[in-house]
Amino acid sequence: MNTVRNTRRLAATLLTAALAAGGLTVAAAPAAASDVVAKLPISSFSALTVDSAHQRVYVADSNLGYYDNKGLVAVYDFSGERVTTLTTARHISGLALNADGSVLYVGSRDGVLRYDTTTYLPLSSVVAGTDTCGRSMAFAGGKVYHTAPYANYLSDCDTTLTYLDYSQADHTWQRSGWQDNGKLQLEAGPGDRLMMGQPLNTKAPDPFVSVFDASGTTLVRTAGRRFADAEGKGALNLKDMAFSADGSKVAVADAAAGTRLLNTADLSDAATGYPALPSGASASAVAFSGDGKYLARGAAASGATPDLLLSPADPEDGTAPLEFAFEGSLDGDRVAPRGLEWSADGSRLFAVTSNTAGNQYWLHVVQPPAVQYDARFTGGLAHSPAQAVVGEALAVRGRLELDGPAPAEPLKVTATRTDAAGTHRLGTATVKADGTFTVLDEPDLIGEATYTVSFLGDLTHRPATDVTHTVTVGKAASSIALTAPAEASMSTGVHIAGTFTAQGKALPERAVLKVERTDRLGTGTLSSVTVAADGTFTVDDLPRTRRDTTYTVSWAGDDLHEGSSASATVRVTR
C-alpha cells in the first residue's frame, strides 16, 4: 500500500490490553494510525458487519453465479485473525446483527439464516421470499428488515422489482408495502431509524434515498429525496450511505457527486459539506465512527490517488485527512462498495478492498491514532531577500514544531498572501525533518503583503495557530549600461551601444529611452531610442562642438519598475 499526502500509516505493532469486562483481549490503538491486512477467502463480496460486543467482523461472499452455489461468511477478530467460516447450502448476501449482538442474521436464497454469535451454531431460520439477486439487510426497531428481489436471469437483477420485508416474532415474514426497482440498499441508524437507497438503473433514472421511523408496528417514511434537476441532471449514483453517530446527518457515497452530507430530518443538504474527494477518485463507501469522531470515505482510484480518507466527522473541522492509497496484490486496488464499518468505540475501521477485476478481496483493520498531539509555529517567519520586489522570487521561511511521534511522511503547511488585490492561495510547502519549511512566491503588487502560514493538522496532530508576516514590496530595479568611444570627431559622429535590463515582471512593451547631450553650448534632448527585444539599443549623434560631450540615457520607470539612467563622456575633435 502506498501512502500519500497526510498519510500516517505505520507498520502495525499491536499491543495487547486486557479488557476489564469479560477478560477479552484486544489490540490497543497506537499513537499513530496502523493498518493490518487479511486476504479474504472470497471471490465476490456482498456484506460487512461488525459485532463490537464480541469483537468480531463478518464478511459475506454472495457467490450468485449459479442458483445452487454455496455461500460463506468469513469471521474475523479485531486483530485480523480468522476465527471461523460459516458455510451455507445456497448463496448468501446481506448481514445484520440484533441490538445486543447475540444473533447474526444472514440473507440466503430461500430465507434468512440465524446464528448464535458466541457458538456460531445455527438457530431457527426466518422464512423469507426467494432471493435470486442478493439481499440487503438491517436491524431496526427490534425487527430484521430485508429486501426481496427476484429475477429469472441475473442480467435482470439491476432493474427487477424489489420488496422491502421484515421478520415477525414467529420468524415468518411480512411485506412492509414499500418496493421499487433495482437492488435496494438498507442501513439502520440510531433512534430506530431505517434508511433505504436506490441504485441508479434504467428503470430508475432519478433514484431516491428515504428515511423511515421503524419504532412502531408500521414502517413510516419521515423523509425522502431524489436529486436530479428539471433537466434530469445530478441524479444520484448510490454506492453506500450511513447515519452519523447521533443520527442527525446522513452521508451518501455518490459515484457521480462524491460525498453528499444531508440533514436526516428532511434530507436537505447540510449547511457545510465535506471537501471533494481527490481528483480521479470515485466514491464507493462511507461510514461514521460510533464515537462520533471520524468519517471514513472509500473510493475507487488508481495509482497513488487515495482510496480511503479518514477525516473528522465535523465538516467544520479543517483537519487534513489521513489518506491511504491501495495498490497491488498485498492490499487490493480500491475500497469495495459498502465496504466500510467501524467498531462501536471508533477504535478500529474495517475496510474491504478489491482488485480491479473484482474477484479478489482483502480485509483491512485500520486503527486511527488514539491521541492527538499539539503543533505550533516557533520563531515567527522571516523572508529573503531583505528587500522584496515585484515579480521576483521571495522566500518566506519558518519552523513547525510537533509534539508526539515523528510523522511517517512529510507534513505540509499551506500559505496565502494578502495584498491590495485580496487574498491569494500559494499552495503548500513541505515541512522538513527538522521542522523548517520554505514558501516561495512572486509578489505582483507594490506595497504591503501579509503572508499567512497554516497547519491544518492531521489525525495525529492538532492544527497549529496561524502565523503571519508582513513584507513591504518595492518596485523592481532597472539598469542601463553604455559603451562609448573615448574620442570621436565632429565629422564622423559618435556611436554609443547600450543595454537595458528590467528585473521582475516583463514590461508590457519595449522600453523607450530618453537621450540627452550636454556640451559647452548647453544641454539638449536628442531623439529617443527604443530598446530591442534582446535589451540592446544604439545612440548615434553628430556633435555640434568640440571638447567633452556627455550623453545621458534614462528611463523613467513604470508602476512596477524603478527608473534608471547612465552617462558616457566623449572627447570630440574637429
Image (spheres, rainbow, N blue to C red):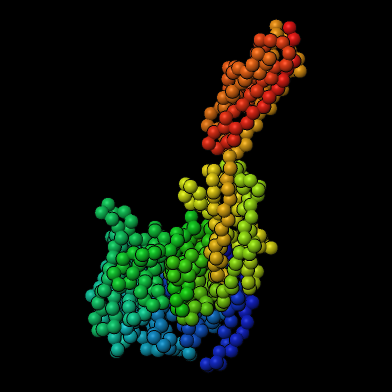
Q: Look at the image and tell me in which quarter the C terminus lies.
A: top right
In this rendering, the answer to whether 343 lies above or below 387 is: below
| Image location of residue 454, percent across then percent down | 55, 61
Quarter residue 442 falls in: top right
Residue 5 in view, yes or no: no
Quarter residue 150 falls in: bottom left
User: On the rendered structure, is 353 left or right of 547?
Assistant: left
Residue in view at x 58 percent, y 81 percent: 28
Residue in view at x 51 percent, y 84 percent: 55
* The one of 257 and 483 positioned closer to us in this rendering: 483
In this rendering, the answer to whether 558 lies above or below 60 is: above
| Image location of residue 135, percent across then percent down | 36, 73
- Total marks drawn? 0
Q: Look at the image and tell me in which quarter the N terminus lies.
A: bottom right
| Image location of residue 282, percent across then percent down | 45, 59
Residue in view at x 43 percent, y 67 percent: 315
* The one of 12 and 431 positioned closer to us in this rendering: 431
Residue in view at x 48 percent, y 65 percent: 318
Residue 499 in view, yes or no: yes
